[in-house]
Amino acid sequence: MSLHSAKAFPRPVVHPWIFNIIIAIIITFFQNIIFFKKILGLVDISQLNNLLFFLSMPVTLLFALNFIFSFLLLPYIRKPIIILIFISDALAQYFMLSYGVLIDRGMVQNVLDTTPMESFSLLSPQLIYHFLVLGVLPSLVILWIKVKPILFSWHTAGFYFLNILLSLCVIALVATFFYKDYASLMRNNPQLIKNLVPSDMAVGGYSYYKHDYIKNMPFVQIGLDAHKTVPVNDNQKKNLLIVVVGETSRGQDFSLGGYDKLTNPRLARDNVVYFPNTSSCGTATAVSVPCMFSNMTRAHFDDDTAAHEDNVLDILQRAHVNILWRENDGGCKYVCNRVATEDLSKWKDLPQFCSDGVCLDEALLHNLDAYINEQNNDTVIVLHTMGSHGPSYYQRYQAAQATFSPTCDTNEIQKCSNQALVNTYDNTIVYIDYLLDKSIKLLQAHQDKFNTALVYLSDHGESLGENGLFLHGMPYAVAPAQQTHIPMLLWMSPSFVQAQGIEDECLRSRAKQQAYSQDNLFATLLGLMNVGTKLYQPALDIVQPCRMTQS
């Protein structure tokens, strides 16, 4: 370029904050067309609230990117990072638009496994167009722009802080008015996030890396010394235990714990021991379910380690306890990988409970009586329920359990009043009460052959609008009690109590006074099933302090 041309077209010099805003604008409005197009297909913008909700999305994305770029786009690395984002997202946009693919771990795997010949076969004028217009052209613009070097000073530090604060304030303001809409939309359409640039590539790439890393981790067996022990009062009967793992049921809505609405009428008559002060290990199923069956406590829980290590079901099975896991909540999160498993989503012959691959939890009891009749050994049956999973709370119970009204009969919970939403959720608790009572009656029908017992605890709780929050999944450190306070209860047949040498009043008194958590499940299951191992920690066994030392 001649000197005259350089003077005619001088390189613009911009402040780093302006540079970040330019990048955020390009990504928001030019590289997320597919994302917003899909949103338009899901949201009826003819309604004023929905229109404002839709318009809030690019604002939220713009300031979220500005916040992230404030930390990511540092001198010397900012332009290479942005060019990489532009090029990769231009290609991703083409494949999403042309082939309807989603950018996730599997797609990243496909890209890395593609041969040069396969890559050339994908070339087309449209691909080259996307690459040049959405990738190369904005990259050249970024290279052309000169970012003004800024020396550190209190003035620049203050400006930097205010920029971050502005982004957080805008995001918080949007959340104040539309959090419920965002929570409902994303919960009902979880694949949407895989259309969002640049998080699709970042999350997909990280997921691939993590999956590739952990799949090569060696599997570790623990509890190799597991063995049967003799109960305090051996009555020669085998033990039969049903463990019901709840989903999204919060402790504050159980009338057994003092809730002012009668959500547990049947359990109140079943003489269960209820533990009103119980907390979860996490605020999402993927954390809490592996954690509760793991030998690790919440303070030391590591998901990767748990996925490659025996859990309490493996140890019980090693001690010759029969294990059956019945699944109705989308997966056991690798806990049941090595035990007998039945997945309700694959059952086709239960129209009274199931439709379109979704089943009411009562289906978990289907033909369970016949299975129990075949058992001649100590047996543990785990029922992983759909429970109170939202936002489609109205689909989690039958008309017979519709105790409270009005109800929120839609998955668009933002359209319902808080009273209707809570009523619908509480009806799911009434259904859980019905399911647990039916499970107890099933156990009672077999107590002539077995010492029978039932343990129930939820994986985590749920927010229903308290402090403007909905659903669950908040970081544990800042999660409200509604998401971490869970229900837990224990029912035991008279012969089970007698064989274990349990002092009933002691257990009930401690249940009211002590605080418990999912950390207690590992040791408690070993104790209830009379399985000894050096991994057993009596201090974490809920029942141990109330066992008599002799008959």
Image (cartoon, rainbow, N blue to C red):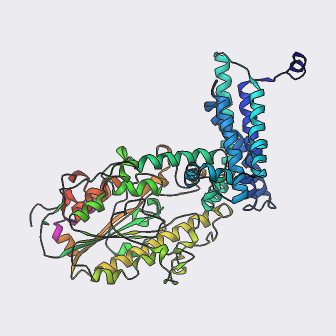
Q: Is residue 344 magenta?
A: no
- The quarter in which the N terminus is drawn is top right
Side of 164 where 204 appears, left or right: left
Residue at 89% over, 21% down: 5
- The quarter in which the C terminus is drawn is bottom left
Residue at 27% over, 83% down: 373
Main structural element of the magenta stretch: helix, strand or loop?
Answer: helix
Q: Is residue 502 magenta?
A: yes
In this view of the protein, which residue sits in the foreground, 111 or 254? 111
Side of 114 where 170 appears, left or right: right
In this view of the protein, which residue sits in the foreground, 507 or 131? 131
Q: Residue 213: percent from the left, percent from the top? A: 44, 46
Q: Residue 445: percent from the left, percent from the top? A: 29, 83
In this view of the protein, which residue sits in the foreground, 540 or 464? 540
- Which stretch did the figure color magenta? 499-508
Q: Taking the image as drawn, is residue 342 in sight?
A: yes
Q: Residue 495: percent from the left, percent from the top? A: 19, 75
